[in-house]
Amino acid sequence: QVQLVESGGGLVQAGGSLRLSCAASGIIFRLAAMGWYRQVPGQQRDLVAQISSSGSANYVDSVKGRFTISRDNAKNTVYLQMNSLKPEDTAVYYCNAESIWRREYWGQGTQVTVST
């Protein structure tokens, strides 16, 4: 059974930083593509950043230069370092894994709130 467990969300002032973590189990992590998505109530879930099994990363334009996605295959964990946070970054952040068989899995989400 695949499990993705996010942590690290919380309340932070604008300009501050947070680091999200997602610990994966039940999946061949080193072969999986990992991603972070976010969702605001009433809106669709949007991609924030992705990292391939080889470590290649891509970002949505709104977070480029502020967020960094990384992975530690020894710990089966993917991270999202978020700097210079803005109120518009407020959302529930979800971890996503895509296995080598193209199956997708989701974490339960972690709330990030950025105050002015």
Image (tube, rainbow, N blue to C red):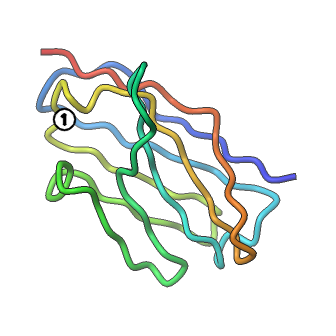
Residue 71: percent from left, percent from top: 49, 66
| Image quadrant in which the C terminus is located | top left
State the residue position of label 1.
Answer: 85
Residue 101, compared with residue 21, is above or below; it is below
Q: Is residue 52 left or right of residue 4?
A: left
Q: Is residue 6 left or right of residue 59?
A: right
Q: Is residue 18 left or right of residue 99?
A: left
Quarter assignment of residue 17? top left
Quarter assignment of residue 13? top left
Question: Which residue corresponds to the image point at 37% horizontal and 27% vertical from the top-left?
Answer: 91
Residue 69, compared with residue 56, is above or below; it is above
Question: Which residue corresponds to the image point at 42% horizontal and 63% vertical from the top-left?
Answer: 50
Please name the amino acid that badge 1 sits on.
Leu
Residue 15: percent from left, percent from top: 11, 32
Q: Which residue is outermost to the right?
A: 1
Q: Is residue 41 left or right of residue 82?
A: right
Question: Which residue corresponds to the image point at 37% horizontal and 60% vertical from the top-left?
Answer: 69
Residue 9: percent from left, percent from top: 43, 29
